[in-house]
Amino acid sequence: MLEEFKRYIIENDLFKAEEKLLLAVSGGIDSIVMTDLFIKTGYDIAIAHCNFKLRGAESDRDEAFVKRVAGGYRIPFHSVMFDTTGYAAEKGISIQMAARELRYRWFEEIRSRNGYDYIVLAHNMNDNIETFLINLTRGTGIAGLTGIKPKYRKLIRPILFASRNTIVQYSRLNKIKFREDKSNSDTKYTRNKIRHTILPLFREINPSFDSTITETAIRLGEINEIVTSYIAGIRQKSTLIKGDKVIIRLRELKDLAPKSTILYELFRPFGVIPGQTDDLIRLTEGKTGSQLYTRTSRLLKNRNEILILPFEPDQEKYFEIQSPDDFRKLPEFSSAEIKKVTKNFRIPDKDKIACLDAGKITFPMVIRKWAHGDFFFPLGMKSRKKLSDYFIDKKYSLPEKEQQLILESDGKIAWIIGERIDNRFRVTSATKKVIIIKSTGK
């Protein structure tokens, strides 16, 4: 196994000999065997251990055991204790998901803080097969059937080549001590149910099932590279990026087939899951204003486009402005000042700057989001206009309308911020003082 380990590292270009590695070690057979292999090859390593406090004193004994292993070989040791149950309850997620989020976040903190080049994980061939079947049962695209990657960003998995039987044999041959996690045999967990109940049936049907699935995952990985390249070409033709907003132009997708597969792969980076594919098709064919929410994004139909925005809980904006100085406290404004009107005064001619008659302004002023039913008197007009009609005329998208702020004085709209002032607050020949407000355009 040691020679295979060395060869696997080289063939997959996992890391360079001089690089520093942070080993994630639970104390179980996989991570302890992996540690032994690294010790025998002489690489520069450190050990990181997470105590999730899920098994009482057993969790503490796991931590003490891993610490003794590190101390025995004089390997740098990092450990952390998590309130995993509390975190899961706070986030409304499963214990397994909570433990995953907590450990990966902490591993990266330790890696970057201490200058380690990679985080090393002890996933083996059986983990890969189990992940394949879990994704298959939940529904997934091609990428979900390609298995676990040996190297992904700062994560490397150098014993993916080894089956669990190989690891057990190595530990017996080398008399390696490790900790048994009794929860690994509890079939209430999906992975354990597949490991102990489903996989034995597959192996009974096909004794070579493990190698067959592994080879299939490799072939699907190669197919996924072809699909990824094809989708990248479509994405390049159809996508525009404006700030934190992504725009997909639907006319570029009109004649593509098979539509559901292409749409899924195209929108997958924005949190779309297989179960949302039908909803995604309905969105692309729906009317302006139709929406679809994913785990990470908000997808919005706007004419012949899909707008993709970060999904964030709506936060109402409402500010009271007691004096011109208060404008500068807000990120939407760069300055505000009151000036006397002199003979040489000129009104700034820019959308982002409002020049209002200070004598017609009443403090406190209010900054808020617009609401249906709002109206104003556009500069130069004596009749009022609904803001909703103004936005239609200006071809505002729904997100632009939702984010538009207004400046209000004594219950009257003085300025559609960054756009147009109200005629009632315009500067006239009788104006003595003006207030000039500069918007940042945010």
Image: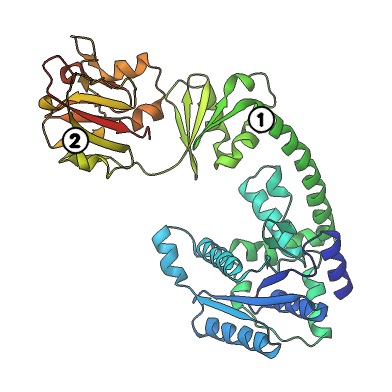
Please give left or right for residue 325 compared with residue 305 in the image.
left
Pick the front one: 154 or 80? 154
Task: State the residue position of label 2.
Answer: 366
Residue 314, image x, y percentages: 34, 41
Above or below for 98 versus 271:
below
Pick the front one: 369 or 362? 362
* Residue 213, quarter of the rendered image: bottom right
- CA–CA distance between discs 2 and 1? 43 Å
Task: Assign a secondary structure to mark 1.
Answer: helix
* Residue 31, quarter of the rendered image: bottom right
Residue farthest along the front direction in this orientation: 343
Q: Quadrant of the N terminus?
A: bottom right
Residue 308, image x, y percentages: 50, 34
The colouring scheme, among rainbow, by chain, secondary structure or one colour, is rainbow
Q: Quadrant of the C terminus?
A: top left
Above or below for 341 versus 56:
above
Looking at the picture, which amino acid does disc 1 mark?
Gln
Looking at the picture, which amino acid does disc 2 mark?
Val
Label ID, residue 285: none
Task: State the residue position of label 1.
Answer: 236
* Residue 336, quarter of the rendered image: top left
Say whether disc 2 or disc 1 marks the residue closer to the N-terminus: 1
